[in-house]
Amino acid sequence: MAANRKLTVGVIFGGRSVEHDVSIVTGHQVMDAFDENRYTVVPIYISRDGKWYTGEGLRQLDNYKDDAILNHETVEPVILSPDVRHHGLIRNPLAGRFSKSEVLRLDVLFPAIHGSHGEDGTLQGLCELADIPYVGFATTGSALTNDKILTKQILQQNDIPVVPGITIQRDDWLRDPQAIMEQIKGAFAYPVFVKPATLGSSIGVGRADSDELLKASIDVATSFDRRVLVEQAVKGIEINCSIMGYGEDIRISVLEQPLSWTDFLGFDDKYLRGNEGMKSADRIIPAPIEDDVTEQIQQASKDAFIAVDGRGICRIDYLVDSESGAFYLNEINTMPGSLALYLWRETNMTASEVVEYLVKLAQDAYADKRRNVYDYKTNLVDMAAGRGLKGVKGKAKGASS
């Protein structure tokens, strides 16, 4: 790459997710953070029904009112090609006989899609197939941390404290809700929290302190996911921190205590009380907790980041019991679930420095990946062609011994 050439970064946002609108805001925060003298930013918008687009009109938030963005004169359809020869977007992907497709090459992809088809490893898998460096957790880590139930199991195996919980299957709930209610009440005292296993932004999350609210909360959660997590509520405060890194290079931010009007930070608290997402919520930075607890939470965050094969950036949320002082890891919010730009500003990093560092980490991870061997040739195909599949795989099904 020429020394003075700008890096071309494709920022992907929108998507087939209940968090579509949140993602649009995040995508624009990311695009605005890049230094235009050093980077060429390509907006990549995925519509609510899963169609891909690019174009300068996507850079203006006003164009998204009433879903009118797709009619903007500069917006055109594209696809991200999984073919390694393209290494980017195909413009005019359905070109006919009298027109031609065009490839727009990308140096790095920056996913900014929240929730389904963005944080769950599916988009990361596409980036892997396309063989383009991408920001954030890899496929496995994204899929794991997107699932609250599996994350809890991994953290428990690594001796990281978590809140006790019970997993509910939607089919079991529909078959015998009373039995599920009794199971929960036998394990926990009210209040409890009910959460869909794989959604973010507090969508579908309910707090129940009665049988009526518990049933209603489970009905809502099971409408979003076939698996639901029920946890004992912890009376105390929430403490958050952010982590960035790859390999042995791990940075941990200052801690914060977010404040909410309600018993937990819901969607409105996170996104509708200002125009800067979690940054606009009320908070105390640094968190008003003892120095030794701060150090323990930061160490637990590093341990958790390593345990789930973290890379790029995430925000980790904790609950600190007001009576015992014990802390519990509540949730790992991978990028783009939280860029936590406001926390890194407290560590003297600007938004531009954060996104640039994340691009560097993506390139480091890509360089590491290229050390792997993927082309391993054998004579298996020649043997199969010469002997037939039966000779290679063993006797055909139903053949006598």
Image (cartoon, rainbow, N blue to C red):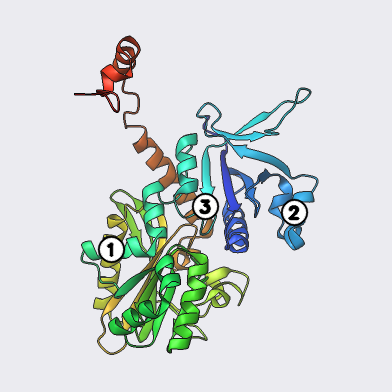
- CA–CA distance in space, label 3 to label 1: 23 Å
Residue 69, label in figure: 2
Q: Earlier in the sequence, mark 1 or mark 2?
A: 2
| Quadrant that contains the C terminus | top left
Q: Residues within 10 Å of mark 2 (few under 14, many from 20)?
A: many
Q: Position of residue 91 (x, y in %)?
A: 68, 34
**Picture quadrant of residue 191:** bottom left
Q: Residue at x 35, y 53 (%)?
A: 310
Q: Secondary structure at mark 1?
A: helix
Q: Say which residue label 3 marks.
A: 117
- In the rendered image, the vertical position of residue 382 relative to residue 232, given as above or below: above
Q: Earlier in the sequence, mark 3 or mark 1?
A: 3
**Picture quadrant of residue 364:** top left
- CA–CA distance in space, label 1 to label 2: 42 Å
Q: Is residue 283 visible?
A: no
Residue type indicated by callout 1: Gln
- In the rendered image, the vertical position of residue 251 relative to residue 261, given as above or below: above
Name the front one of labels 1 and 2: 1
Q: Residue at x 45, y 50 (%)?
A: 358
